[in-house]
């Protein structure tokens, strides 16, 4: 049973890390997490290489949607998977693809696909969105140019969530770090251990109590 599906569009991509040929680069089931600003909320990934790209074209596939989704899941897990693994992805892809038209180009955004150049107004998995057209489908779009329209601040506003701040000095979006649990418990009061603190304030606390400054493990800072 044939189905409509999406593959990487031919020609220049605004953002692409996938070097596969378009006919090889079918879209994978979305892996969106709670950090959609990193790209998982607005980029497709390739079933072949698992790398991201921006724009996909709707095609008529000779395979059924179940066959395509099952192949994607088995390639990802490198083994046959039970129905309870395949079915949620199958249902999600069926929902995403139900309105696509062969030959037209689409981008992914927050659990849905949207035609390039068409106005967007919808409530997604993470937040609510309104664009005259998808910013990541525009020619010349780059990670730098998308820091505003699809960066971290935008997504938190879309979800109605406040920005992260240092509980001590109020710095917005302090760079994230980790230290051993025993050091965190030693220097941070129990009432503040679920909060965020900047490295400068953490150093001040350690110096104030005359402790040994632990070596931090820095968490990669994503686009804001």
Image (cartoon, rainbow, N blue to C red):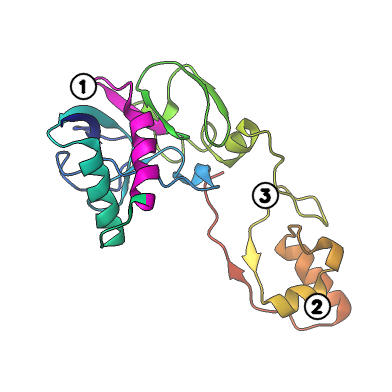
Residue 95 part of the magenta-drawn span: yes
Helix or strand or loop: what does disc 3 sit on? loop
At a point 34% along the width and 36% down the height, the residue shown is 93
155 to the left or right of 96: right
Which numbered mark, 2 or 1, is in the foreground of this view?
1
Q: Quadrant of the N terminus?
A: top left
Q: Which residue is mark 2?
A: 186
Helix or strand or loop: what does disc 2 sit on? helix
Closer to the N terminus: mark 3 or mark 1?
1
Q: Is residue 3 above or below residue 85?
A: above
Question: Residue 117 location in percent, x, y?
Answer: 36, 18
Pointer 2 with pointer 1, Cβ within 8 A: no
Question: Residue 188 location in percent, x, y?
Answer: 81, 69
Q: Which residue is mark 1?
A: 102
Helix or strand or loop: what does disc 1 sit on? loop
Report crowding for label 3: few under 14, some 14 to 19, many 20 or more residues within 10 A (C-alpha): some
Pointer 3 with pointer 1, Cβ within 8 A: no
Closer to the N terminus: mark 2 or mark 3?
3
Magenta stretch bounds: 84-108
At a point 24% along the width and 36% down the height, the residue shown is 65
Q: CA distance from mark 3 to mark 1?
A: 42 Å
Q: Quadrant of residue 63?
A: top left
């Amino acid at each position: 049973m044939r189905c409509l599906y999406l593959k990487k569009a031919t020609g220049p991509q605004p953002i692409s890390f996938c070097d596969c040929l378009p006919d090889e680069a079918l879209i994978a089931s979305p892996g969106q997490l709670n950090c959609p600003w990193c790209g998982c909320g607005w980029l497709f990934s390739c079933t072949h290489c698992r790398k991201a790209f921006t724009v996909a074209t709707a095609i008529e596939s000779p395979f059924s949607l179940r066959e395509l989704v099952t192949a994607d899941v088995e390639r990802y897990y490198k083994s046959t998977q039970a129905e309870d693994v395949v079915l949620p992805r199958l249902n999600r892809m069926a929902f995403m693809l139900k309105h696509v038209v062969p030959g037209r180009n689409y981008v992914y955004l927050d659990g849905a696909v949207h035609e390039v150049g068409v106005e967007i107004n919808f409530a997604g998995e993470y937040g609510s969105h309104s664009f005259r057209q998808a910013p990541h489908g525009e020619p010349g779009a780059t990670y730098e140019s998308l820091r505003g329209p699809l960066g971290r601040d935008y997504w938190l506003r879309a979800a109605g969530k406040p920005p992260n701040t240092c509980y001590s000095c109020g710095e917005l979006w302090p760079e994230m770090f980790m230290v051993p649990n025993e050091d965190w418990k030693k220097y941070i009061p129990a009432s503040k251990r679920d909060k965020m603190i900047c490295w400068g304030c953490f150093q001040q606390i350690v110096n104030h109590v005359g402790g040994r400054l632990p070596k931090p493990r820095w968490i990669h800072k994503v686009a804001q």
